[in-house]
Amino acid sequence: QVQLVESGGGLVQAGGSLRLSCAASGRTFSNSAMGWFRDTSGKEREFVAALRWSTGGTYYADSVKGRFTLSRDNARNTVYLQMNGLEPEDTAVYYCALSLTNRSLYLRAGYDYWGQGTQVTVSS
């Protein structure tokens, strides 16, 4: 049984930083990809970033490029989303997700497992 556990959300002022973590357990992840999505009130869940576990290749939405950075800790099966220069528009519930097929990483349908979500609130 795959489990994804997110942590690190919270309240921060505009311009501040947060680091989200997603710890994965339940299987090996060498051929998988980890993604982050976010739910903003009134909008569909949108892609934020993704990381291919085998290559370390990363992909970002245009809205976060240059501000958010993905990294990983192989020993802990954990992916981190470092968020700098946060803006009120980044306020959302952030979800990590696991893609077993390593395809369609920009789409919700490309992912097989989801975490419970963590709230990020950016005040102006």
Image: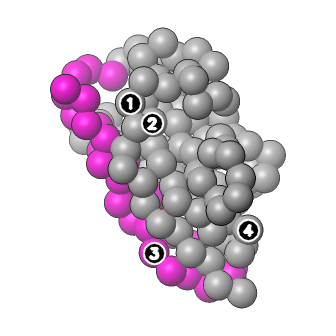
Residue neighbourhood size for the residue with mark 4, other residues' Cα within 10 Å, grouped as few (<14), some (14–19), many (≥20): few
Magenta residues span: 1-29
Q: Residue at x 42, y 24 (%)?
A: 112
Look at label 1 and name its amino acid: Tyr
Give the secondary structure at mark 1. Answer: strand
Please identify the quarter of the rendering in which residue 108 is found. top right
Q: CA distance from mark 3 to mark 1?
A: 23 Å
* Left or right of 20 in this view: 26: left
Give the secondary structure at mark 2. Answer: strand
Which residue lies most toward the front here? 42
Q: Dot 4 corresponds to which residue? A: 89
Q: Residue at x 55, y 81 (%)?
A: 12
Q: Dot 1 corresponds to which residue? A: 113
* Left or right of 57 in this view: 79: left
Please identify the quarter of the rendering in which residue 37 is found. top right
Q: Residue at x 37, y 44 (%)?
A: 115
* Left or right of 27 in this view: 46: right
Q: Dot 3 corresponds to which residue? A: 10
In the rendered image, residue 86, in percent from the top left (x then y), is placed at 67, 71
Residue 72 seen anywhere in this rendered image of the structure: no
Residue neighbourhood size for the residue with mark 2, other residues' Cα within 10 Å, grouped as few (<14), some (14–19), many (≥20): many
Look at label 4 and name its amino acid: Glu
Q: Dot 2 corresponds to which residue? A: 97
State yes or no: discs 2 and 4 in contact (Cβ < 8 Å): no
Q: Which quarter of the image is occupied by the N terminus? A: top left
29 or 99, which lies in front?
99
Task: Pick whichever of labels 4 and 1 is earlier in the sequence.
Answer: 4
Task: Pick whichever of labels 2 and 1 is earlier in the sequence.
Answer: 2
Q: CA distance from mark 4 to mark 1?
A: 26 Å
Look at label 3 and name its amino acid: Gly
State yes or no: discs 2 and 1 in contact (Cβ < 8 Å): yes
